Amino acid sequence: NSKFGQLEINVGFFPGGGGTQRLPRLIGWGRAKDLIYTGRQIDATTAEKWGLIDRLVAPENLEAEVTALAETLASKSPVAMKLTKQCLNQAMYSDLASGLTFERKNLAVCFASHDTQEGISAFLEKRSPKFTGK
C-alpha cells in the first residue's frame, strides 16, 4: 500500500540530504528526474520494478517478514557484515579499480578474523556458526 516520491518540488524546494545524488544512482537519471521534477508518487509495484525497494509484502505479513529478515541479518558475522557494508558503500562512490583495491584490503582483514575461522569450521563440521564479532 506504500507510495514513494520526492515531493519537495511541490512545496518550493528540492530533495536535500542526498536525494538528488542517491536517487539517480539507484533508479537511473531519467526516472529520478521524473520523480524529482514532477513531485509525483509511484506505487509499491512500480518501486519494486525500478529497484527502489527489494520486495513487496502484504501489510498483514509485514511484521513477520521484518522479523525474519532481522533474524537472518543478526545471524551473520558482525565483522563480515561491517566490512561488506564498507565495500558496498565504497563501490557506490568510486571507480572499479579503487573499489577492487578497497575490497582486497577488507577481504584480508575479514580472513584474519575469528569469525571467518569459526564460519569455515562450522561449515566443515556441518553446524551453525557462533559468531562473536572478533
Image (spheres, rainbow, N blue to C red):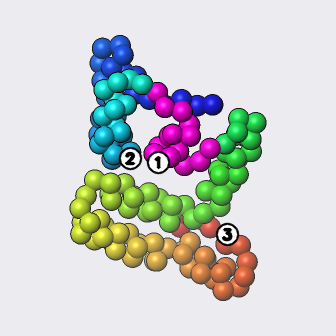
How far across and how far down the image is residue 58, in percent? 70, 39
Q: Residue at x 50, y 46 (%)?
A: 49
Q: Nearer the viewer, residue 117 or 86?
A: 86
The disc at residue 51 is: 1
Q: Is residue 36 visible?
A: yes
When asked about the image quadrant of residue 107, the answer is bottom left
How far across and how far down the image is residue 131, in percent? 62, 67
Which label's residue is closer to the chain start, 2 or 3? 2
68 horizontally vs 2: left or right: right
Q: Which residue is mark 3?
A: 130
The disc at residue 26 is: 2
Q: Is residue 53 visible?
A: no
Q: Dots 2 and 1: beta carbons under 8 Å?
A: yes
How far across and how far down the image is residue 102, in percent? 31, 67
Image vertical order of residue 10 relative to residue 23, above or below: above
Check disc 3 and give the amino acid type. Lys
Q: Residue at x 65, y 81 (%)?
A: 123
Per the model, the C-alpha gap separating discs 3 and 1 is 33 Å
35 horizontally vs 130: left or right: left
Label 3: state its secondary structure: loop
